[in-house]
Structures are given as C-alpha cells and as structure tokens.
Image (spheres, rainbow, N blue to C red):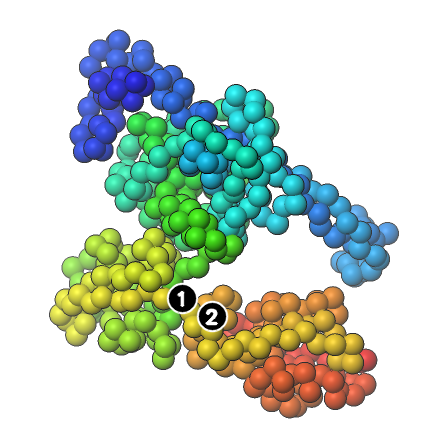
Amino acid sequence: MYRAILTAAAIGIATLSHAETKVPQSQAEISLGFAPLVKQAAPAVVNIYAKRVVNVRQSPFMGDPFFQNLFRDFGETRPRVENSLGSGVILSEDGIVVSNYHVVGQSTDIRVHLNDRREYSAEVLLADQESDLAILQLKDAKDMPHLELRNSDTVEVGELVLAIGNPFGVGQTVTSGIVSGLARSGTATGNARGYFLQTDAPINPGNSGGALVDINGDLIGVNTSILTRSGGSNGIGFAIPSALVAQFVDQARQGHEGFARPWAGMFGQPIDADMAEGLGLDLPGGIVVSELHDESPFKMAGFETGDVILKVDGQPVNTPAEMIFRMSVAGIGKEAKILALRDGDMVETTVSLMAAPEDPARDTVTTGRRSAVPELVLSNINPAVLGQYGLPLSLTGVVVENPGQVGTRLGLRAGDVLREVDGRTIETVADAERALEKAKRKVTIEIQRGTQRIVSRFRL
C-alpha cells in the first residue's frame, strides 16, 4: 500500500520499474514526505550488539609517551571483552541478515534487536574482512520483515535515498539524501576495498551495516563508512552495492564460511589521458594489462600484456577494483563477457571465472619448539596465496601466514616472503623448517615485503 501511495505521488523518484521520474506537482504531494516509506522499510533494519574476546597485553608502561613504545611486548596478555554496536538489514523471512564485518567479525556473542523490541541471538554464516560484509542467521526466526534487493547497477546519480540505522546507539534513525556518485573505488576507510555507492545522506557511527534504500523501499546498498576529518558526517558516505550483497547471501546459503571471489590472475593499470591518446582511445578509461600469471583465466582466454580491458558484462571498468567487483558479482563458475582493445581493434572475449588454484599445495606448517622462530606458520606460495596477500604474480617460495609471538617481536608480518635463513635459500616449507632448526646462536633471516628486502639478525 505504501509503495502504491509513493508511486502515485511520484516524489521525484523512479516508478516501480525505476525508469521514470517526476517532481512533486502540488503541496499535497510534498506533504506526504517519507513517512509511508519509513513505515515500510524500518521494521527490517535491526540494531546489533556484539561481543568478542581479545587478548590485551598488560604493561606497566602503557600511557608513558616514551617507554610504551620501547616495551610494547612487555607484560602478560589477558583476555578482555570488547563490545561493538552497529546495524543490520533482514533480507529474508527466515532471518538472513547482512551487516558489516567490522561490526560482527570474530564476535562470540551477537544479539539482534528489531524495531518492534523483539530480540534474537545470531550466528555468523559468512564473513569477509576485505569486502567488510558479513551474513548472519537469526536463531529460531520466522516470518521476519525484510527488504528486497534491487540491482544496484540500475541506480543513478541523483536518486533520492534514505539511510536507516542506529547512530551513536540512540535508537533507530532515518536520514535522507541522494546518490552522489557511482563506482567509487579506493576511497572508503577501514578494511573495505572495492566499489561503492556514494551518498550525502548522513551516516554516523553505529550506522555501519544499516540500509541505504531507494524511494520504493528496496535495498540498494549497505552503509559501511564515511570520509571525515572530525569523526562526524560531512555528507560523504559509502555503501556496499546490493549486487555484491546478493552474491554474499547466495554463498552463505551454499554453506561457505568465507567469501570466494573469482581470481583474475593479472595486474592492470588504469588509463589516464596521456595513455588514452597513445592507445587511440577517444576518452581515458579501461585497464591496460601489465602482468599475467601463467594460470590466469584471462591468459587462457587469449589475453596478453598490453591489452586494454574496457567492459565486463557490459559495464565499464576504470580501475582493477571495479573489475574485481564485476567478476565477484557474476560469481565463480560463471562466464564474463570482456570487451577489450587489442592492437587497435575491439574484441569481445568470454572468460571463465574461477577461484585461485591451490596448486602446488600450500603444505602449511607451524614451526616447533626446536625452531629458531617457534610457532611460525608458513605456507608454499601458489596462486591462491598470491591472491590472498596481493603478492607479485611472479613470486615463488614460502610465505609467512602467521608470525607467532616470537616472529612478531622480530618484526615479521603475515604476507612476508621468506627468502633466506643463515644464507640458505628457502624454496619450500620443508627448506624453511630445516634451516630454522639448524640455526646457531646468531641467526640471520632475509624476507621480502612488497618491493623491499629486509634482513633481521638476532641471537637465540
């Protein structure tokens, strides 16, 4: 009923087909406001209270401006309970909820409060820190109010939107604005990387995981972050598009615990004005392929370095993040149509989307007590490892998956590539285990971190 009222009033928005817009024609139309829409959408937006246990080091030097940095690893670790507050959106009658990873990730106790004061416990079905999304399941839930997902590819700049959430814990709040921009990549804060919708609807702390809905009450995005210097809303907020949320829900229902995104097996560079002129493009746009892995699905489809990728499934891509977003929306096991420029000619090629191969096997090991660096978790590098840590495609050898307590003190990080131990070249995890167990009193470890070579020397 509310949707019919709003459509008839045509308050400057699209009809149900999202094809036509119309500004209010009378005071009566203007006076309707957003109240019918809020009544329709708000019951499906929930407040989330999450707890997690973290180990915190208790040091007598904490708070000292000089000694706290010198003795940051001094003292015992003790468990401490951290609380987080955020929002979520119910997407199905059986209680599937989407929220942000930074709200519920690694939580041990999650309570979900509905607008009508009902309360449910929830468990995380699927979580992904890189996309900053998590899918929850409410326990013993049925006949839940929920929002429909609208294809975010149909969203246009200038559309009216509402942001619904629980800012600062004051209770459910609604703010209005417009879609300010599309295809924003590399601009959001926090762990989220990729492609975002931008809105000027105020988003404040606690709004994370809340709904960004269009004028028909359909979900077009999940609010995730803001761009600010003061900590408050400056009218630049970002939402994860609903097209990616739909893929997360599908994978959660299939039983995945982590999000499986297609592997490109390539590196590309955005094209600027100078490059466009040299390539014969009328306007800057697309990605020029700069490196391809031997097992890349793009290489298998015939791509070569120097090719320019312009569109994926009919949608333009101007950054690597946009291309990965388009591939993620399509999903593993599907095919994507790629429009490219090759030697001055436009070509369209189909690429089979696949997960990064776990070949050769990781053979993950954890070093023992006899090792120079005990509790160090190491794996052989394969395409899946390259994709996980964003390593150069030509790298081989052994990667640090978890430095452990001793490794952390030595400055090791997850994603470091172990090159040498006491002058011995490391090619496999077996090489690393042997070299670390044979180490004498003075140990020299050489690692590669990005483009840097780092040497660490220490005594046992």
In the image, residue 329 lies at what x, y percent? Answer: 34, 53
Residue shown at the point (46%, 25%) measured from the top left: 43
What kind of element bears circle 1? loop
In the image, residue 247 lies at what x, y percent? Answer: 38, 50
Q: Is residue 230 visible?
A: no
Question: In the rendered structure, which disc, 2 or 1, sits on the residue that comes first in sequence?
Answer: 1
Q: Residues within 10 Å of mark 2 (few under 14, many from 20)?
A: some
Name the kind of residue labelled 1 in the image.
Ala
In the image, residue 4 lies at what x, y percent? Answer: 26, 20
What kind of element bears circle 2? helix
In the image, residue 414 lies at what x, y percent? Answer: 60, 67
Q: Residue lying furthest right in this view?
A: 60
Residue shown at the point (60%, 69%) measured from the top left: 401
Instruction: Kindly indicate whether the residue at mark 1 contacts the one at mark 2 (C-beta within 8 angstroms).
Output: yes
Q: Residue lying furthest left in this view?
A: 345
Q: Residue lying furthest top in this view?
A: 28
Name the kind of residue labelled 2 in the image.
Ala
Quadrant containing the N terminus in the rendered view:
top left
Distance from label 2 to label 1 (Cα)? 8 Å
Residue carrying label 1: 355
Q: How many marks?
A: 2
Q: Residue lying furthest bottom in this view?
A: 424
* Residue 403 figure quarter: bottom right
**Image height of 15 relative to 266, above or below:** above
**Image height of 359 relative to 42, above or below:** below
Residue carrying label 2: 384
Quadrant containing the C terminus in the rendered view:
bottom right
State the mark number for residue 286: none
**Image height of 304 relative to 159, above or below:** below
Tell me if 284 is positioned left or right of 328 in this view.
left
Q: Residues within 10 Å of mark 1 (few under 14, many from 20)?
A: some
